[in-house]
Image: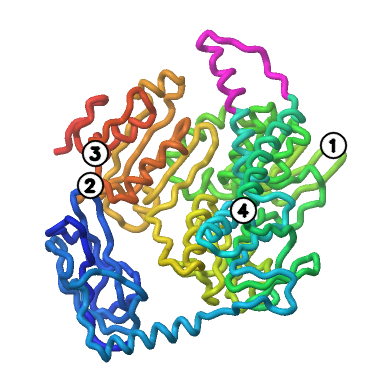
Amino acid sequence: MAGTVELVIPDLGDFQDVEVIEILVAPGDTVAIEDSLVTLETDKATMDVPASHAGTVVSVNVATGAKVNAGDAVVTIEASEVAEAVDVGEKTIVIEPEEQAAILAEVAKVAEAADVVKEPLPDTTHFAELVVIGAGPGGYTAAFRAADLGMKVILIERWPTLGGVCLNVGCIPSKALLHAAKVIDDAEAMAEHGVKFGKPEIDAAALRGWKDKVVGRLTGGLTQLAKQRKVQVIHGTAAFASSHHLELDSGETVGFEKCIIAAGSEPAMLPGLPNDPRIVDSTGALELDPVPARLLVIGGGIIGLEMACVYSSLGSAVTVVELTDALMPGTDRDLVRPFQKIVAKRYEKILLGTKVSGIQATTAGLDVLFEGKDGNIAETFDKVLVSIGRRANGDKVAAEKAGVTVDERGNIPVDKHMQTNVPHIFAIGDLAGGPMLAHKATHEAKVAAEVAAGEQSAFDARSIPSVAYTDPEIAWVGLTETEAKEEGVSYEKAAFPWAASGRALSLGRDEGFTKLLFDKQTGRVLGGGIVGPSAGDLIAEVGLALEMGADATDISLTIHPHPTLSETVAFAAEAFDGTLTDLYIPKKK
């Protein structure tokens, strides 16, 4: 449908005279259906007004600071497409009968184009409305959500258990080992406070067994959840044979109406390394077989540093080598500094700005050659962990046979509905771009499943938190200071040191701090970072503040329990507001 259309404010419930706080489009911009036009703010929350039509912006009819009500026109566009089943109230848009007929004809045309095969293909062993490739957090979440919405679902997993990398050889087993490491470290730290324990005896086999038991409980639970939802689980490696059918390594075939690719990622390895069992990736490191006297961790990112914490606590002399000049590249330096100060004393060496130029395997060990600022050095280690990142698996499923676009890094481009360039095929998780995080994948999974089931859904998270489960933990969400400086964003930082926190002092952990970044003009939260025990749990409050468009006062006036680490978030907000009494911070002139 073509023609000029006024896009209006939808039903706002009981709210009236709502303020426009941001204009998101300008004349000449091209907008798609559900793209945000303006941002409104009430005394309770903020909301974006989406476009009910696609087209080109002709004019913006409101200004920042204007007060609007339901039915008020905000943008005029030259329309090219109308949203399906958009209910925005009686005052929304007046459309002439002939225009309505054109809209209905266009909707019917789109539905016809999106129609998919309804009967099993004659040459497929299995068939379902929806097939999900990969049963990690993204894959099983998508399968379960789609089943809850009434779809017949097949979930294909190459491993013998569900859960993918995260549950089997990633997030969960590593956190079990990190907990064991923390118990060891905490026991040792209590010696200076009058509680002394003997040197711990490490039974690596028993520790590995406990870790595996934790994993087994979770993966077994997933199997039960799949049965309860009548999701058919097929174990095997899948590859596309066409846009509506997969081939398995068993020789079986699977037909589908729609498909969600959730095949995850794999650890990246350095080229030219010797084939030696003492050189492991993160999966091999979890086996603790054996705990080496000297361990080299190649890569100073989150995964490598988490495993360095584990092995250091278990008694290994750990060396970390990082090609860049900083640990956890990209993370704000002030967040990393307390962690680095602690591990610099615990680890044998931290080699920054240093390259591993070669490894030679000998009977005595692994001889490693380093190239750094101070020249070349060689050292021998009992085990080497290669942790230099992960690579997406988008190019491992023959997606090109289905016509799906895959880039050179194995990522599959998707839109906000998680749809690929082939609309009935979706991609989520590590191979859909963005941070490779399980909590991102699960949210994308629900969007993909809901869209596949015919519901209106889109991935529009304002921020995705990141956590390093090291000791101390480091967590951040939203805008970082590094990004703010690079992008020229005007912000103000407010920080609260844990040395002034009663709870932190009682834990014997005063090295941390909580910081929040605020918009200088509005006081709205832009981002935050926390370093210290349980930072990964505490950062959720900052994420919620971002999602809700909260400002410093919203946080500071929320009563936090005392004494807790969580109140450090409120104290940081009070520091910005100028109401903090737990520290003396002179008011800015």
SS at badge 3:
helix
Q: Earlier in the sequence, mark 4 or mark 2?
A: 4
Q: Amino acid at mark 2?
A: Gly
The Cα–Cα distance between marks 3 and 4, rounded to whole angstroms, is: 41 Å
Mark 3 or 4, closer to the camera: 4
**Quadrant in the rendering for residue 345:** top right
Q: Is residue 500 visible?
A: no
Q: Which residue is mark 3?
A: 576
Q: Which residue is mark 4?
A: 136
Q: Earlier in the sequence, mark 3 or mark 2?
A: 2
- Near-viewer residue (45 or 565): 45
Q: Position of residue 199 (x, y in %)?
A: 68, 16
SS at badge 4:
loop
Q: Earlier in the sequence, mark 1 or mark 2?
A: 1
Q: Residue furthest right?
A: 363
**Quadrant in the rendering for residue 53:** bottom left
SS at badge 2:
loop
Q: Is residue 75 left or right of residue 81?
A: left
Q: Position of residue 150 (x, y in %)?
A: 53, 62
Q: Position of residue 473 (x, y in %)?
A: 49, 35
The Cα–Cα distance between marks 1 and 3, rounded to whole angstroms, is: 58 Å
Within 10 Å of the Cα at label 2, are there few (<14), some (14-19), or many (20+) other Cα atoms? some
Q: Answer whether labels 3 and 2 touch (C-beta < 8 Å).
A: yes
- Near-viewer residue (475 or 384): 475
Q: Earlier in the sequence, mark 4 or mark 1?
A: 4
Mark 4 or 2, closer to the camera: 4
Q: Earlier in the sequence, mark 3 or mark 4?
A: 4
Is residue 95 depicted above or below 507 in this figure?
A: below
Q: Which residue is mark 1?
A: 364
The residue shown at (67%, 59%) is 232
